[in-house]
Amino acid sequence: MCIVAIAWQLFDELPLVLLSNRDEFLQRPTAPLHQWADKPIYAGRDKQSGGTWLGIHQEPYGDFYEQNGRWAAVLNFRDGVQASNDERSRGELVAEFLSSDLSPMAFARQIDLQGYAGFNLIIGDAKQALIVNNRGHAPTPLYAGLHVLSNGQPEDSWFKTERLRSRLRQEVLPLIAEDNSLEYWRDAAFNVLSDNTPAPADKLPDTGMAVEIEQTLSSVYIKPIAFGDTEKNVPTYGTRTQSILTLNQSPSPIHAEPIFRAQLQSREYQ
C-alpha cells in the first residue's frame, strides 16, 4: 500500500530527499530500476500496466544522460473503493509527468481525476513540488519541511507515517546535516524504511477494511504475508521495492543558475 517521506528544501545542496516503500502483490510482474527505451524515464516499471510508482526524467545523450530535475511518485488511496476495469493505471500519471514539459501545477490541474482509482500523486522539479489526489485534495505546493504520507489524506496521522517521521528526524536527517553524500546516510535510511513494527490496536486507521487487514498493513515495511488467501498461508503481498531519490545542487561552470542532478537507488524484494 506504500509510504513516501519527502524532506523538501531542508538542505541547501540537497533540496529533495525522498524515501519510499512500494508494497504490492508478489505475483505482479515488475521490472527493476532501469533506463526506459521508449520514454525519457529512469525508474522501475510495472510490466502489467506499463507505468511506474516512482521515477525521474532522464534520457541518453551520447555517452551521457540528460536530466531536467523532474521527479514523481504515486500511491494508491485506501478507502475501500475497488478499482474498476475501465480506470487507467495510476502509474501512467508518473510516466506522463516525467515525459511532459508542463510545470508541476499545470500538469496537476489538467489531470482527469475521475479517470483513475484513488491516488495520491507527488510531482516536482528543482523549484516546486506539490501533492494532489482525486479524493478532494486540490493541487497544493509542499512547504519546506518533512512530509510523510501513505494511503490516506496527506494530513492524516497514521501510526506508520508518524513512526517513519520520528525515526527520520532522529536517525537520518541529522546525518544528512553532517554529510549530505548519499553513501554517508544511505544505510541508515534503508534501515528506517525496514521498520516492521505494527501499530497497536488502538492506533489503526479506519479505511473501510477489516481490522486484521489494517493491522497487517500498519507497519512501515510489510513482511511477505498471505494476503487474500490465508488458508494456504503462502506469501502473496509485501514490500517489494525500497527507494532513495535525491536532487543534488552544484554550481554551473557556464550558467548563473545551479545544476541539479537526480540520484535514484532501489532495493528490490521479489
Image (cartoon, grey):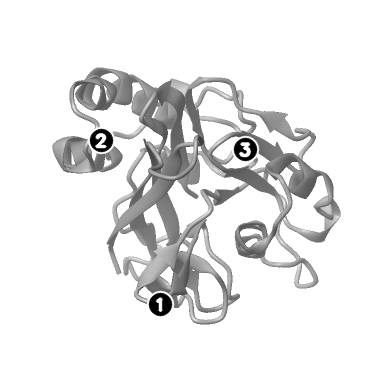
Task: Where is residue 227? Give x, y as percent.
Answer: 43, 60
- Going by the numbered disc 1, the residue's amino acid type is Gly
Q: Residue at x 51, y 78 (%)?
A: 47
- Three-letter amino acid code at the position of disc 2: Val
Mark 1 or 3, closer to the camera = 1
Q: Residue at x 48, y 75 (%)?
A: 36
Q: Where is residue 74 shown, x and y percent of the image?
A: 58, 50
Contact, mark 1 vs mark 3 (Cβ under 8 Å): no
Q: What residue is shown at x 67% (from left), y 28% (from top)?
A: 141
**Callout in the foreground (3, 2):** 2
Write down the residue under mark 3.
207
Mark 3 and mark 2 lie on one chain; the one further toward the N terminus is 2
Identity of the residue furthest to the front in this view: 254
Residue 238 can be seen in this image: yes
Q: Earlier in the sequence, mark 1 or mark 2?
A: 1
In the image, which disc is placed on residue 192? Answer: 2
